[in-house]
Image: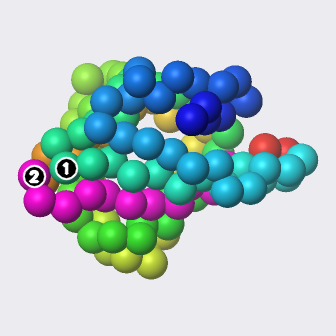
Amino acid sequence: MGNVNDVGNVVDMSEKPGSHSELQLEDEHFRVTRWTIEPGGHIPMHEHAYEYVVIPLTGGTMYVANADGTHIESVLTPGVSYSRPAGSQHSIANRDTSQPIVFVEVEQLG
């Protein structure tokens, strides 16, 4: 299945070990993507071209490695959203070996 990256290009998801996405909506204003990071999986380093909101559907801890070398342990609470600015560069890992991390990402395109 092809997926759309942050600049609207189709991405080969084999580049994202242990994770997959489902594009739910895209129009001139928003792109909505449901992401699943499997136990032990990750999304490699990437840059967000747009401001975005994350809505966690599951709890858990995401391990975020920023491009500047800093690391964050982000504890997710289902339904508790947060936003990030355009230009964010990071990779995300799910170190839990028993449950996936699932979230919806809403990008503001225009």
> Residue 64: horizontal and vertical position, in percent?
28, 40
| Labelled pair 1, 2 in contact (Cβ < 8 Å) | yes
In the displayed structure, 67 sits above or below 108; it is above
Q: Can you identify the residue that label 1 sits on?
A: 39
Residue nearest the viewer, comparing 91 with 69: 91
Residue 53 shows which numbered tag? none
Q: Is residue 32 magenta?
A: no
**Residue sitting at the far right:** 28
Q: Is residue 98 magenta?
A: yes
Residue at point 27%, 70% (across, down): 59
Residue at point 39%, 29% (across, down): 16
Side of 43 where 93 appears, left or right: left
Report the amino acid beneath label 1. Pro
**SS at mark 2?**
loop
- Among the two numbered marks 1 and 2 on one chain, the one whose residue lies closer to the N terminus: 1
Residue at point 19%, 49% (across, down): 39
Report the amino acid beneath label 2. Thr
Residue at point 41%, 71% (across, down): 57
> Residue 86: horizontal and vertical position, in percent?
62, 37
Residue 97 shows which numbered tag? 2
**SS at mark 1?**
loop
For the residue carrying disc 1, how many other residues have a C-alpha within 10 Å: few (<14), some (14-19), or many (20+)? some
The segment highlighted magenta reads 97-108
In the displayed structure, 49 sits above or below 56; it is above
Q: Quadrant of residue 45?
A: top left
Q: How many marks?
A: 2
In the displayed structure, 85 sits above or below 49; it is below
